[in-house]
Amino acid sequence: MAWASEWLFARRYDSCDPMTRILTLSNMYPPHSLGGYERSCDDVMRRLTSRGHEVTVLTTDMRVGGIADPLHEPFARVHRDLRFYWRDHVLLRPPTRDQWAIERHNHAALARAIELARPEVVSVWNMGAMSLSLLTAIERAGIPMVLAVCDDWLIYAPRLDPWTATFARVPSPARGVIDRLVGVPVQRPQLTDAVFCFVSDATRRRAQQAGAWAIGRSTVVYSGIEAGEFSPLPAGVDHEWRGRLLYVGRLDDRKGIETLLRAVARLPDTTLDLVGHGDAEYRSRLDALAAGLGITDRVTFDAVPRGELAATYRSADVVVFPSEWAEPFGLVPLEAMACGTPVIATCTGGSAEFLRDETNCLAFPPGDEHALAAAVLRLESDPALRRRLVVAGADLAAHFTTDRLADVMEEWHVAAAARFRDGVPADLPAPLTVKAPPDAP
């Protein structure tokens, strides 16, 4: 059986149309998604479609409980056909024969998508727990790829793909023989000619230091928020401090939620809303911790539709971003700032490239519930500080919009599709220099 890349390699498409045909590949895609990575992909693809580009999305059959499939995909052709090595927050490592079945299924789905989309460029987003051999087939077919790297999958994805990991130590000539025998590629892509668009310089540095691939042509493309969805209370409308703390994001043990719960235990006049999805086991751990701290009656868990997030941010007195790992970027602080809500954060990883202690947020060391509680008390007692952080935060958020993200991503995709005949887009300037604002009235 000829594998997909051989079939694809024989096809070449020439177009004089001004639009670009884009095939987008991602392990999750809204509304069945868990975080900002997938939302950014959706935001960009919606805009590229509205600008006349022809977008086709190929993603997995993953479903989030309680969320129905969209009746219509109004902006793009979305095919939820792929299978991946993850289910219900559990990584899968099936027997080799079952892996082979998954790979054959996925390559058939890729071939159908290619035949439908006739892409001039493939836009690759999150490949965690995915068949990396799909990128091998695309690479062998000679289709340019732009990788939107919004987390560390260049480091961890090879460990989560059991199929290519099984053959990683097989000598290259032998892998070629196995390719032909099993009908699908067994080796990882080289990515020699791919474009890497990193969400932050911190993410790029980690990939350069510890990633599985050499990083060739790359740039930094900061993520952005939907300016029309996040806005502050009307001018002149304010509310007194009520001690309402808010966390938005995945329920994940790297996110510092346990530190936040311990801080709430030190703040008897506060409540905490935790908004986000997570696996049942970790949620149970959080419930047990809250019970042990005696704060169950002051902690609520919820999942809020995207359209209601702005109201959720505006209802809080402070948004806490307590991550204890090197965040690739961090959309939550920017969304909160756009809604006029002050932020307390650990400023880790990529978020350190735009968060500034005492300027647009209050910072505390990761894992330090004492410092976090002190920061909350400081905001409570100092309305002028709250106003100053709100003013600076709004100014910062205005620089990081989805429109700007889509502008830059569009430029790189169009250039890659043209194989850079008209040159390479300008690299992003140095990270935004955040200046202290004048004192707010």
Image: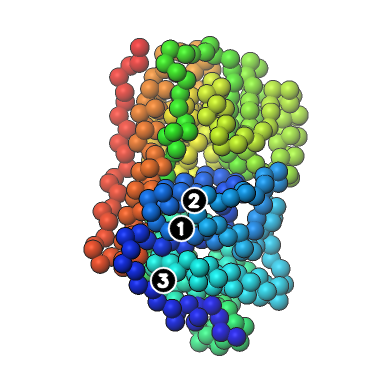
Q: Image check: 278 left or right of 325?
A: right
- Answer with mark 2 or mark 3, whichever residue precedes in sequence: 2
Circle 2 Cα neighbour tier, 10 Å, few/some/many (<14 / 14–19 / ≥20): some
**Marks 1 and 2: CB-CB under 8 Å?**
yes
Identify the residue at image location x=63%, y=69%.
162
Q: Amino acid at mark 1?
A: Val
Identify the residue at image location x=55%, y=71%.
112
Q: Which residue is mark 1?
A: 55
| Residue 382 in the image: above or below residue 84 | above
Q: Which residue is mark 2?
A: 75
Q: Amino acid at mark 3?
A: Ile
Does the image show residue 82? yes
| Residue 254 in the image: above or below residue 340 | below
Circle 3 Cα neighbour tier, 10 Å, few/some/many (<14 / 14–19 / ≥20): many
Q: Secondary structure at mark 1?
A: strand
Q: Secondary structure at mark 2?
A: loop
- The Cα atoms of the two marked residues, 2 and 3, are separated by 23 Å
- Residue 203 location (% of width, % of height): 43, 51
Quadrant holding the C terminus:
top left
